[in-house]
Image (tube, rainbow, N blue to C red):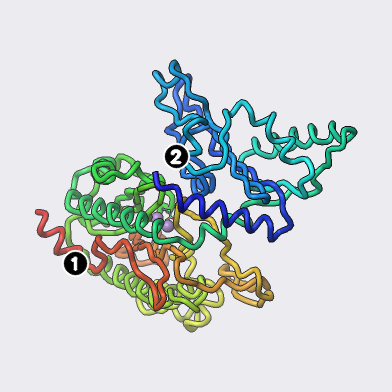
Amino acid sequence: MDHSMYAARRTRVIEALRAAGGGVAVLATAPERQRNADNHHPFRHDSSFYYLSGFAEPESWLVLTSTGRSLLFCRPRDAERELWDGYRLGPEAAPGELGVDEAHPISRLDDELPPLLNGQPGVWFPFGGSQEVPRRVTQWLDTVRSHERMGWIMPTQQRDLNSLVDEMRLFKDEHELALMRRAAQISAQAHVRAMRFARPGCREYEVEAELLHEFRRQGASGPAYGSIVAAGRNACVLHYEAGDAPLQAGELCLIDAGCEYGSYASDITRTFPVNGRFSGPQRELYDLVVAAQEAAVAATRPGARKQDGHWAAVRVLSQGLLDTGLLSRDAHGSLDDVIERAAYRRYYMHGTGHWLGLDVHDAGDYLSQAEAPVDQPDGMGGRRTSKPSRLLLPGMVLTIEPGLYVRPAPDVPERWWHIGIRIEDDAVVTAEGCELMSRGAPVRADEIEALMRDAR
Ligand code: GLY
Ligand code: MN
Ligand code: MN
């Protein structure tokens, strides 16, 4: 394996540790999770651990010191266990394979860490994650404390390692972007496959099976999150997952599904008519969401703020809600009133995007911590004073995903009822604007209709 990029990332963390006064950084991969009896959920490594190690086995820890050492703790070779559970790299081969300075069996962790912490200013680990890491750190610190009479020196600080690593993860390098483009391409092809397959009478789970087939056929490890295949009224349930409802002629089907490829997520939503042709009211709202997404895409460029895309989409959607009468001018006033009072939230109640990377909701601050707080809309119809949304820079990857969801209500004409639409693409910020990595699946209504016509 070419481990140079992982080594380079570790070096950046070590430099950041030095710049912050020094110390030891500790991170563990994710725990294996029991599903039932002796049966486990499929293992998925911790994202930050993998980002810095390139190592995907369970039961492993990475330690970085500001003196420049990198240590891996991993499962030892074991012929009996490997017969049942699979091959292990083992500590003997780990330095050559992963580029770490040293590797030890996982059983050595409690022996090696206290002397490493002795005399260090602080210990860094991810805050807010697994309880196992702070529990072990406390044990190691207890050991250091018990050796103080022999001259050992206690670290005085515990600090959040996420504050260093999350900011690195936010900016994707070329290796990461290549994996993310491939993930998005596979997912787009899965959406095309699903659109071609879908027809009145088939079930949500059958459509889901088409998505999964395409993910695995092309080498993705599987879905990056629970696939949403929502027919008709189910599209108005934001976290619906694929169930067994039949797709019915005259309804829309919303699919939010993306694969994980090379440990990187993609996240795509498309909405299409089950019978291949949008009805008048469906088309009207669909084109509105397309226009909202175009406005958000145009606002996704270096120098703009993360939230600019959201407000651009909200403005287009709000104008459309007034034009269609879904929001009445009598009750809600002008476009600015609709936005200021967040009346659009009745039909558009989620944000327009999130960071995307190793995690589908990826690491990285959304606010510009270096800037002074400003008075701004809170998105709920009020205002608040808080840090501004951060400026976009090349290499950031985010989703752009406006939608509209109309539930039945006495003041809503029946032709709009149960229409749920979302369009979601994956964008990398470039020097000039942004590149949409997921456009292998059509967005424009006429292109979707043409694709579905061809499939029949
Ligand atoms: N599929 C998760 C999301 O869109 O945020
Ligand atoms: Mn998303
Ligand atoms: Mn999504």
Of callouts 2 and 1, the N-terminal one: 2
Q: In this view, does 442 lie above or below 298?
A: above
The image quadrant where one finds the C terminus is bottom left
* Left or right: 278, with 70 as reference point: left
Name the residue nearer the viewer: 420 or 356: 356
Residue drawn at x 53%, y 44% is: 49
Residue 314 occupies which quadrant of the picture?
bottom left
The amino acid at mark 1 is Glu
Label for residue 447? 1
**Residue 247 seen from this side:** yes
Residue drawn at x 37%, y 62% is: 426
Cα separation, mark 2 vs mark 1, equals 47 Å
What is the count of numbered marks?
A: 2
In this figure, which residue is indicated by the disc labeled 2? 97
Judged from this view, the residue extending furthest toward the top is 80
Q: Is residue 19 above or below residue 63?
A: below
* Left or right: 433, with 145 as reference point: left
The amino acid at mark 2 is Glu
